[in-house]
Image (cartoon, rainbow, N blue to C red):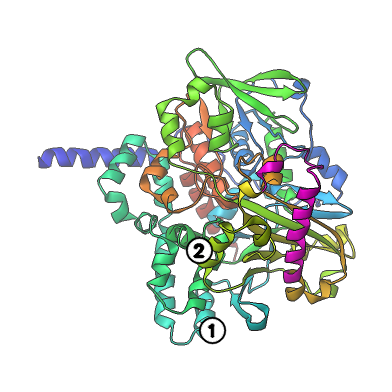
Amino acid sequence: MWVAVGFVVVLLVVLLFKNVFGSSGPSPFDFDSREPLKPMVLDRKEKNKVLKQGFLASKVPQDLDAIVIGSGVGGLGVAALLAKVGKKVLVLEQHDRAGGCCHTFSEKGFEFDVGIHYIGDMLENEMFRCIVDQMTNGQLQWEAMDNPYDEVVLGPPENRRVYHIYSGEDRFAQELKKCFPGEEKAIDEFMRLIKKCGQGIWFMAVLKLIPSPVAKFLVYSGLINRLSYFFRYGTRSLAEVVNGLTQNKDLRAVFCYIFGTYGKPPKEASFSMHSLLLCHFMPGAWYPKGGASEIAFHMIPVIEKAGGAVLVRAPVNRILLNDAKEAIGVSVMKGHEEVHVHAPIVISDAGIFNTYQQLLPKEVQAMSAIQKQLSLVKHGDGALSVFLGLDGTKEELGLEAKNYWIYTENDLDALMEGYMKGDRDEALKSLPLVFLASPSAKDSTWEQRKPGKSTLTVVSFASYSWFEEWKDDKVKNRGADYKELKETLINSLLEVVYQIFPKTKNKIEYMDAGTPITNQHYLASPKGEIYGADHDTSRFSTDVCISMRPQTPIKNLYLTGQDVFLCGFAGALAGAMLCGSAVLNRNLYVDVFNLCRKLKQAKKKTQ
């Protein structure tokens, strides 16, 4: 018996070393590809020459190595990784500009970011920053936000409490202790747990990198829960853990405040997911210099340098399969005609639901392996956005490079449950959760690009069903009832805006709202979600983690982006890293770790 056990252990060690530490083939991180900074392109027309290259069959490169469906950061990221080892990649985007949730749009002289509000963990030569730097040849610049970077606002206007969220592990805890005397033990234990869970995220990547049978052994033997706090707490709700630490309702709310970055209230949220977000922002918060469109703008040239292309207005209507049910390309709708584009590898950044339910033939959708994956996940909640263009500089309007998380009370679960289950028309008159920020105040190039102007963005959540009746109407003409509903939403949120930024009153020159069906149209999100598949506690069960991998049941078809790993910019980028690892048959995380170590050593020598 012990001989057999010993053999299994040795075999596991060999497989883990081969798949987690061993690599073969070229790597996009073989050397530091950062180049000297080039002058920023501030002219919108010049940027659009890169971001808005329309699809034509004549623009499709010959002898493609891969096709990527969707130009979100998961799609552009994996395309850039492949391009860095000489692969010719075509990225196809259904919208009229590249970037996915990282794109921007302009109206009435204002520019608005739709999905990037702030990014954490951007310290120089740390792993996450290193990945982004290499994907953009070091051309994407980042601006540090204020500290505190988040303000948590609890209660109605007549009894409003404001709590400051600072970066830095020590200061984060110290400032909380100042606000909540007598709660030091609860705060220390909270900090210990989020740190343990946040550090354990790497085991999630390991489960997706190693062969499926080995991953299943680690899961079903219980070893993974012993090895990783992330999985130990993955299916425990945020509310359960936090409520066990303190009876102070304001402190509970402050512990839970950032749940809007992944979209689930505390009783449905995974404590591990929440921990990961807090750890992500512990070093600080950053914003892309020049706005969110800079991300795609600097990834596309990397793809083009290897002979690839990023083409927009290119809606993929199906994935092409051969008789053996292997992916061999895609079909793009050009007007009423199909244009077939072939490649040996097809990668989808369209999300698991679009990929499996919209792009594959019915008989392939019915495969048990595909149905099993679909049964493990569900759609996330829909998102609302309000965009405000203002007359005045950030100084004149009192705007700052920070965010406000505004809750009408401190029982966050009761607030969200009452809102999401309430009557639509009444619910939209008083949103219980409001995220409020000024993108223009975070960007040092803004005043040069848009002098004397400013912007505010407001984000919240809503049920897709509230707006579903208008989903098939023309996007710019959905009818008077829909317009009235949006006006109700905007007016209710303006009251909140004026309370936080009173100087903005009578300064609004442009305002509009985006609903879940807006997201459905522009982002191709099936139910208006912005975070992909739902991030409730079930998403973090070990069964889901080992099932949601870059490899699909269809040979030569891969998934990338948020649904492969986690939501947000960092999560989608991790999905790209995992997908790149699968396609290139090497562990890219080990490669980037080694590069980071070299860069740190080189910097240390020069000091």
Magenta segment: does it hold 472?
yes
Q: Nearer the viewer, residue 502 or 23?
A: 502
Residue receiving disc 1: 179
Where is residue 406 drawn, in percent x and y? 64, 70
Q: Secondary structure at mark 2?
A: helix
Residue at horizontal 18%, vertical 38%? 7
Where is residue 145 drawn, in percent x and y? 68, 67
Q: Which residues are magenta?
A: 467-496
Where is residue 82 drawn, in percent x and y? 59, 34
Among the 4 quarters of the image, the one containing residue 492? bottom right
* Three-letter amino acid code at the position of disc 2: Cys
Q: Earlier in the sequence, mark 2 or mark 1?
A: 1
Mark 2 Cα-neighbour bin, 10 Å: few <14, some 14–19, many ≥20: many
When the figure is inspected, residue 470 is found, relative to residue 403, above or below; the finding is above
Residue 302, numbered circle: none
Q: Nearer the viewer, residue 145 or 421?
A: 421
Magenta segment: does it hold 98?
no
Q: Nearer the viewer, residue 365 or 206?
A: 365
Q: Secondary structure at mark 1?
A: helix
Is residue 290 at least partly visible in the picture?
Answer: no
Residue receiving disc 2: 279
* Three-letter amino acid code at the position of disc 1: Cys
